[in-house]
Amino acid sequence: MQPSKTNDAMSALTGGADDLFAKQKPRGFEAFMQKTTLVLGIIFFALSLALVWISSH
């Protein structure tokens, strides 16, 4: 059987966001993937801006 969950009015409004922010700092592979995703996102954004600038000149 699955454990019961308490469904109060606040959790219905927040959508369980309190569980999301109560999580501990990621470690290991999860931390690596978060950092890699951030770096790749920044590179993608910078390349997008550079391509727009190049195409306009």
Image: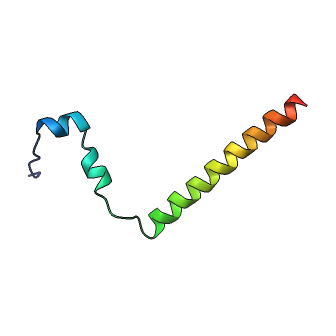
- Left or right position of 25 against 54: left
Q: Measured from the top left, where is residue 25 in percent x and y?
A: 38, 64
* Extreme residue toward the top, this view: 56
- Left or right position of 41 against 10: right
Q: Measured from the top left, where is residue 26 in percent x and y?
A: 41, 64
* Extreme residue toward the front, this view: 10
- Left or right position of 22 against 25: left
Q: Residue at x 11, y 51 (%)?
A: 2
Rendered view: 43 above or below 27: above
- Which image quarter is the C terminus in? top right
Q: Measured from the top left, where is residue 33 in percent x and y?
A: 52, 60
Q: Measured from the top left, where is residue 40 in percent x and y?
A: 63, 52
* Extreme residue toward the right, this view: 57
43 or 10, which is in the foreground?
Answer: 10
Q: Residue at x 86, y 36 (%)?
A: 54
Rendered view: 12 above or below 22: above
Q: How many marks?
A: 0
Scheme of image coloration: rainbow
- Left or right position of 27 against 5: right
Q: Residue at x 57, y 54 (%)?
A: 38
* Extreme residue toward the bottom, this view: 28
